Amino acid sequence: MNILITGCNGQLGNEMQLLEQQHTAHTYYNTDVADLDITDREAVGRFVSEHEIDGIVNCAAYTAVDKAEDNKSLCHLLNATAPGYLAEAIEKRGGWMIQISTDYVFDGTNHTPYVETDPVCPNSTYGRTKLAGEEAVLSACSRSMIIRTAWLYSTFGNNFVKTMIRLGQEKPELGVIFDQIGTPTYARDLAVAIFAAIGQGIEPGVYHFSNEGVISWYDFTKAIHRLAGITSCRVRPLHTSEYPTPASRPHYSVLDKTKIKQTYGIEIPYWEESLRACIECLLK
């Protein structure tokens, strides 16, 4: 198969490129905005046609959650309109598409892990545009798979883990929110799951993926510092109300992974195991 990977310079895109070396049966076209502007409908259609693309993994997105509140049109263009163009183009070739989405499609009022059929109710521009992207892909491509994920981190780019390590080394004290609960996702583990889906065949529909377990941002930070050997920084818990942000965050966004585990027979690592693996790579 010829597989198009968009957003190849991002966290997930970089992890996909590393794993491609283990999945040599297919040809991969790794693109970012300099190679393919996914907001250009004609360019997308031309690329997919000329390279005879059989499948697309869309890792590209506008992910600056707070900035999105002041950049609504750009956020919608990248997160909703562009995925629709990709889905439309691959449908013409009878191909498949994997669209990466987010826990932000939920409002965070649940007290048990969200399943794929739970009502969506995004309360931020980012969440609303990602939901619109889901809908655009599902309506335009009959062989589409939506994977919602959460709290993504990796050795690449900017993310919470790298920021907390840096701040822990620079500051004597940090305040971190303790009343937002979810599950971190190591981008490498998500990439492994995506390749499992590609290898076994795309089963259309909506899926959830994060690492196993449940944690708050405060506890996550404590674990990051412990695993990184940072002992000089005191981490204290904050209420969300003490750290106001332009965009609203879900207070509870734990995702139930039963569907993807049963469909593809995958085992998902516990969040701390994956965090340890990532930090070991970062500190080499």
Image (cartoon, rainbow, N blue to C red):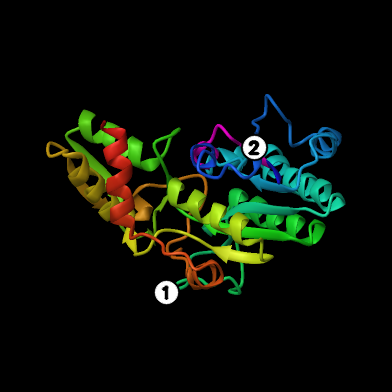
Determine the residue positioned at 38% across, 42% down.
160
Q: Quadrant of the C terminus?
A: top left
Q: Which mark is residue 71?
A: 2
Nearer mark to the viewer, of 2 and 1: 1
Residue 186: image x %, image y %? Answer: 41, 49
Is residue 266 left or right of 201 when viewed as pictured? Answer: left
Mark 1 is on which residue type?
His
Please state which of residues 172 and 187 is positioned toward the viewer in this rendering.
187
Determine the residue positioned at 53% across, 37% down.
17
Q: Which residue in the protein does label 1 denote?
A: 111
Please state which of residues 36 and 168 is positioned toward the viewer in this rendering.
36
Is residue 56 left or right of 221 when viewed as pictured? Answer: right
Q: Is residue 52 above or below residue 194?
A: above
Residue 149: image x %, image y %? Answer: 51, 56
Return the residue found at the far top.
34
Residue 52: image x %, image y %? Answer: 80, 40
The answer to whether residue 104 is seen in the rendering is no
Give the alpha-carbon distance from disc 2 to disc 1, as whole Å: 31 Å
Q: Which mark is residue 279?
A: none
Is residue 247 in the magenta section?
no
Mark 2 is on which residue type?
Asn
Return the residue found at the far left.
232
Q: Secondary structure at mark 2?
A: loop
Determine the residue positioned at 79% across, 35% down.
51
Q: What are the residue bounds of the magenta stretch?
A: 4-15
Determine the residue positioned at 69% across, 57% down.
134
Residue 69: image x %, image y %? Answer: 59, 43
Sooner in the amino-acid sequence: mark 2 or mark 1: 2
Give residue 106's quadrant in the image.
bottom right
